[in-house]
Image (cartoon, rainbow, N blue to C red):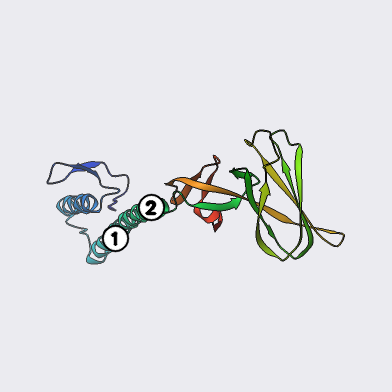
């Protein structure tokens, strides 16, 4: 007869609280001891349980109990870590961050955005587009080194709606087109946790993981 702590039913502990023996170490150990006593009481006197077999079964329950206790400890640590992440994330609420995106942030008739270049460019051009995708303005930023850059767009002459404005970046090195990554600027409005990850909600409606932040502004 082999004892097993898996697929165990719910048991009631000394406080009257029900616990599942498959997940609660104390309940699993109690169930094992009851099964062991029953096994000893009903063993064949002509073929009793030998010491090696009993030792093996006790070692198995100790291993299972230890793993269950470790799992509970890790779950508790993960929950505490999530809470700590959220607390740290709240310090970002109200701060402006840059993340991948092409939404133009406009305040006081000034639009702000950024971009990242993998290699130096001899000329960089930024086009501002309205919500319909039409180009309403173009800025020549000249030569730019590799890395992260920001720009300001003067929207004082623009009379249309600033809702939904976007931008498009074009970079070249001589006649060779270069890859560029647009970066949107937005304020953090809320912080939370999903699947163990710190998640930030931005004023532009975007939701990003903390790891997606490129810079704090």
Dot 2 corresponds to which residue?
Answer: 82
Please provide percent x and percent y for residue 184. 61, 49
Say which label, 1 or 2, has the lower sequence index: 1
Residue sticking out furthest to the left:
14
Q: Nearer the viewer, residue 73 or 33?
A: 73
Dot 1 corresponds to which residue?
Answer: 66
Mark 1 neighbour density, 10 Å: few (under 14) some (14–19) many (20 or more): few
Instruction: Report how far apart the C-alphas of labels 1 and 2 lie in the structure.
Output: 24 Å
* Residue under the point 50% across and 53% down: 210
Name the secondary structure under disc 1.
helix
Name the secondary structure under disc 2.
helix
In the rendered image, the quadrant that contains the C terminus is bottom right
Mark 2 neighbour density, 10 Å: few (under 14) some (14–19) many (20 or more): some
Please provide percent x and percent y for residue 85. 40, 54
Please provide percent x and percent y for residue 65. 27, 57
Q: Nearer the viewer, mark 1 or mark 2?
A: 2
Q: Quadrant of residue 51?
A: bottom left
Left or right? Give the position of 166 relative to 143: left
Please determine whether, in this image, residue 59 is positioned above or below residue 157.
below
Residue sticking out furthest to the front:
156
Left or right? Give the position of 7 relative to 200: left
Q: Nearer the viewer, residue 62 or 101?
A: 101
């Amino acid at each position: 007869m082999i004892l097993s702590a898996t697929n165990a039913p719910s048991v009631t502990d000394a406080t009257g609280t029900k616990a599942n023996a498959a997940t609660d170490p104390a309940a699993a150990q109690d169930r094992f001891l009851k099964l062991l006593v029953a096994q000893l009481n009903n063993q064949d006197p002509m073929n009793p349980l030998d010491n090696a077999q009993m030792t093996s079964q006790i070692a198995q329950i100790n291993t299972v109990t230890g793993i269950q206790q470790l799992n509970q400890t890790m779950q508790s640590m993960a929950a505490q870590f999530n809470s700590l992440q959220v607390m740290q994330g709240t310090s970002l609420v109200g701060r402006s961050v840059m993340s991948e995106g092409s939404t133009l942030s406009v305040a006081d008739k000034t639009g702000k955005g950024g971009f990242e270049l993998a290699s130096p460019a001899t000329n960089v051009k930024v086009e501002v587009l309205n919500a319909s995708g039409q180009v309403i303005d173009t800025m020549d930023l000249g030569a730019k080194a590799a890395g992260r850059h920001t720009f300001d767009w003067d929207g004082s002459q623009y009379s249309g709606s600033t809702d939904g404005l976007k931008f498009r970046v074009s970079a070249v090195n001589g006649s060779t087109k270069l890859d560029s990554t647009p970066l949107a600027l937005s304020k953090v409005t809320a912080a939370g946790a999903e699947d163990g990850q710190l998640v930030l909600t931005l004023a532009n409606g975007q939701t990003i993981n903390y790891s997606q932040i490129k810079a704090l502004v």
